[in-house]
Amino acid sequence: MRSISLFLLLASVTMVAAQKRKPPSSFNRINAANTQFLEKQWWLGLKAGVSFSGTVVQQPYSGLSPVNYTAPQKNYDNFAQPGFVVLMEAAFSYRRFTVAFQPGYRNARFDYQTFYLWTDYQNPDNRLELQYGQQQRVEYADFPLLVRFDATTTRLRPYIQAGVYYAHLIQAAKTIQVTGTDYASGGINVFAQPPVKVGATELFATTHYGLIAGAGASLHSGNVRFSFDIQYRKGMSLANSTSNRYANTRLNSFGDVMDDIHINSVLFSLGTIFPLKFLSKSFQSVTQRP
C-alpha cells in the first residue's frame, strides 16, 4: 500500500508541474493572434528637413553664338545651397518590410556662373571681365514611393530603402548678379550691378521623375516612431523645358539660356509617425509578444 500511495503522489506532482510548464491552448491562440496583429501596421506621420541639389548637364547651350571663339560654359556649384523639404508619410509595415508613400513639397536650389572676357587685341591690358552669377530656385510637389527593410527588430532599427519618385513643378525663379572688373577705363574699376530676380517657371519641365536610394534609422518609443532619414534622388528625365529654352527675353538679354540638365538631390529629414491600428494598453506597435 505504501508503494502504491507513493506512486500516486509522484504522478500527481508530475501532472501539476506539466500543467505549469504548458499554458492552456486558449492562451496560445490569443498569443498567436496578438503576435500576428502586431506584425502588420498602418502608419501616418510627418517629416521635414533640408535638401541639397546638383545638376548633371546632358547638353550645354549658350545665348551667344560667337564666330571666332568658343562660347563660355557654365560653372555649376553643385550641392552648395540648402533648400528644404516637408512631406507626409503613409506606410504599411509587415514584419521588417515597409511600403511608404511620401507626398510632399521640395525646394531645390542650385547656382552657376558664366565668365566673359573682352580684350583689345592691339593692347591686351585693355580688357573687361564679367561674371554672371545665376541662382536657381525651383519648387516641386513630390510623390515618392519607397520600399524599406529594417535590419533589426529592436527599439532602434537601422534600415535601407529604395524607390521611385514623380515631381510636378510648382514654380521657379532666377536671380542674376552681374559683377566685373574694367581694365580699359584708365585704371582698375571693380563694379557690381544690383541683383535682378526673374520668374523662370516656363523654363523648367512641368514634370520629371527619378530613382531613390537611401538609409536611416527609426526609434520606437511606445506606439510612436521617430526617424532620421537620408535619401539620394537621381533625376532620370530632363528638368528643363526644351520647347521654352529661349522663351524668357529678359534672360536672353543677359546671354543666358538653360542647359539640358538632370537634377539630383540629397535629402536629410527628421520625422514622427503614429500607428493607425487601435492597440490596447497591453501592447506596443513594435513587434513583440505580450
Image: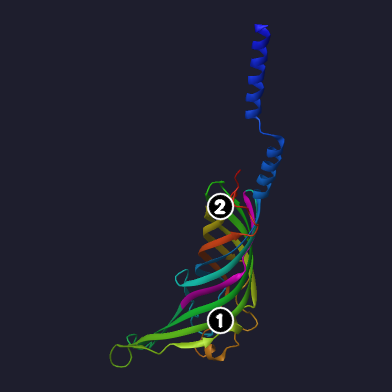
Image coordinates of residue 27 in percent, x first then y, are 68, 39
- Does 287 lie within the magenta span? no
> Predominant secondary structure in magenta?
strand
Q: Earlier in the sequence, mark 2 or mark 1?
A: 2
- The type of residue carrying mark 1 is Ala
Q: Quadrant of residue 182?
A: bottom left
Q: Foreground residue, 24 or 290?
A: 24
Residue at horizontal 59 percent and vertical 86 percent from the top: 246
Image coordinates of residue 19 in percent, x first then y, are 66, 28
Quarter the C terminus occupies: top right
Name the residue that disc number 2 marks: 159
The span picked out in magenta is: 96-112
- The type of residue carrying mark 2 is Tyr
Q: Foreground residue, 154 or 75?
A: 154
Q: Secondary structure at mark 1?
A: strand
Q: Secondary structure at mark 2?
A: strand
Mark 2 vs mark 1: in front: 2
Residue 236 visible within the image? no
Residue at horizontal 53 percent and vertical 74 percent from the top: 107
Tell me the crowding category of disc 2: few under 14, some 14 to 19, or many 20 or more residues within 10 angstroms, Cα based: some
Q: Foreground residue, 272 or 185?
A: 272
Query: Number of marks in the image?
Result: 2
Seen in the picture, residue 52 relative to 200 is either above or below; the reply is: above
The way the protein has been coloured in the rendering is rainbow
